[in-house]
Image (tube, rainbow, N blue to C red):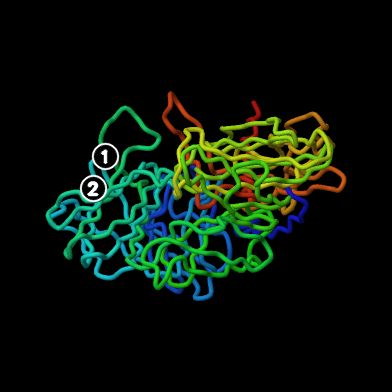
Amino acid sequence: MAHPRGTAHRSTWFLAGALWAGLSALTGAVPVLEQLHPPAIQVGTTREITAVGKFDPWPTTTWVSGDGLRVEALEEKGRLRVTVATNAATGPRLIRLFNAEGASAPRFLLVSGDPQTDELEPNDDFRNPQLVPTLPASVNGRLEKNGDVDVLAVELAAGQTLVAAVEAHVWMSPVDAVLRVLGPDGNQVAWNHDDGRTLDPFLAFTAPLSGRYGVQVFGFAHPADSDIRFTGNARCVYRLLLTTGPAISHTRPLGVRRGVPNRLLIDGWNLPGARPQEFVLDGAVLKEGVGRTEWRPPGFHLPFELAVGDGEEDVESEPNDLATSAGRLRIPGAVTGDLNAAGDRDRYRFEAKKGERLRLSVKAAAFGFPLDAWLAVEGPDGKELARQDDSVGSDPVIEWSAPSDGVFVAAVGSLLQKGGDSLRYRIEAVRSRPEFKATVPESVFAITPGATNEIKVTLAKSGGFEAPIRLTAEGLPQGISVSVAEAGPKESEAVMRLVAAADANPTNGTFRIVVAGGDPEVRTAALHELVSSGENNGVPQGFRRLKIEAVEDLWLTVTPPPPAKEAAKAP
């Protein structure tokens, strides 16, 4: 979503001019980077990893987002040495491989503050698993071939709760993973297929007896195909997170406010002392425009996802099922609640002026809660003015304009009339602003000296945005110019043209497409979205949730000029 902020950008350009001429032998096919294994590395360490893909020739040159990482291509094809500084920021990074002909799509590498364990083959036999001697543990693994099942073992005492999660889908791994726990006798005692948010599994299991328990990881192809078998290949990497320490099942509230300290009550597993536990999250570290964040309190191994907003975060107070007892919904603001009984309906009153544009949304499935929610807006007389039970995903969103000044009611319920304290949700109300989102279909572009390259930019407008939009680029190398493109108030796309001078030097680097318009001006960078979603005959396609879901640092390669044609010989 676009927002009125600056787009300061630092470009880095590689191998320009004479330096390029010395490496002309590296030209060839554009590198194809499909995955990195292992997908995580600890702060302050150096290790070798494998780049999965097609690289002809090798070695290539590497680029990594952010500071504190150095990535070097080794002599062996596909092998990289990664060095992480002791002060490097933790979190996911992007890596590209490039040569004179172009660059790969970006792939993920996690910088972690935790020690990392490698999954080691052979470990398919549950009678001879790989022992994980210490918990918590972060295990980097890979399902290397069809039929592969990785088995790791942990020692549990009677009454001890193991919390386990697999991350594969969120790393763009083409596997719909399954997580299974085997008891000391080899029989299944727990399993999970999806965590409710993604195709990645999560489970919490309390051991009835002391002993050694096996944790199995396997999966099916994603997107699904006609083969009914366990899948595996070099791209099927995963991370297995294991702990018998504290882990979060939910917080109250489910969201935090940007810019201020936030008091959160945590419930979950293996919490010390009385439940719930109270923690404080500093919202000053949350960037503008970020709609969610992963949070891991001190002493916790698994992160928990929280919504991020700019208003007060309140908690439901019962009774609130009638308009006369409705709770308060601030604008902007959010309320965390639950539908604790079958047929329960929660209502919240809010004030609006005639013509005021509001966006009301409920998030439940987005948090992994088993609530198929509906959302309605009711007038002062109790009449229903708007209703929605499905939007993007399965959580409802209503874009609505108030027909008059007054006090209105937002109502939330279960489409299936279910109830229970696991049917949690967060309802949010914000004022709609005239804004837009700009996207491009690719993140990598190439141009030859003397040529012109067209880039189509798609514009999704909302909040009544009806102003012209201007597009330009920043961070381009010398010899590359751009024609300023415009889109009219009713147009949903624009075409930008990059022009390379005939004497432009071959080079590689990042740039941004800057999109601006409106009064006051909305200014943002065009994004290439790494996530994709859809269905083919009911089968999920693409990746709906990733560790990094979009990039605004696009890549441009100015390729070497084509070889000069030999002059025609005189007769």
Determine the residue positioned at 46% across, 42% down: 419
Mark closer to the chain start, 2 or 1? 2
For residue 452, side relative to residue 308 (left or right): right
Q: Where is residue 324 drawn, in percent x and y?
A: 68, 44
Task: Name the residue carrying label 1.
Answer: 230
Q: Quadrant of the N terminus?
A: top right
Q: Which amino acid, mark 2?
A: Val
Q: Is residue 211 above or below residue 366?
A: below
Determine the residue positioned at 70% across, 34% down: 382
Question: Which numbered tag is attached to residue 561?
Answer: none
Q: Is residue 483 above or below residue 6?
A: above
Q: Looking at the image, do the residues carrying marks 2 and 1 touch, with CB atoms under 8 Å apart?
A: yes
Outermost residue toward the right?
519
The reply to whether residue 218 is in sight is yes
For residue 173, side relative to residue 548 (left or right): left
For residue 359, which quarter of the picture? top right
Q: Is residue 140 above or below residue 297?
A: above
The reply to whether residue 56 is in sight is no
Q: Where is residue 305 drawn, in percent x and y?
A: 51, 56
Label 2, label 1: how far apart the Cα atoms are: 8 Å
Q: Where is residue 446 drawn, in percent x and y?
A: 62, 42
Q: Secondary structure at mark 1?
A: loop
Outermost residue toward the front?
324
Q: Which amino acid, mark 1?
A: Phe
Question: Which numbered tag is attached to residue 149?
Answer: 2
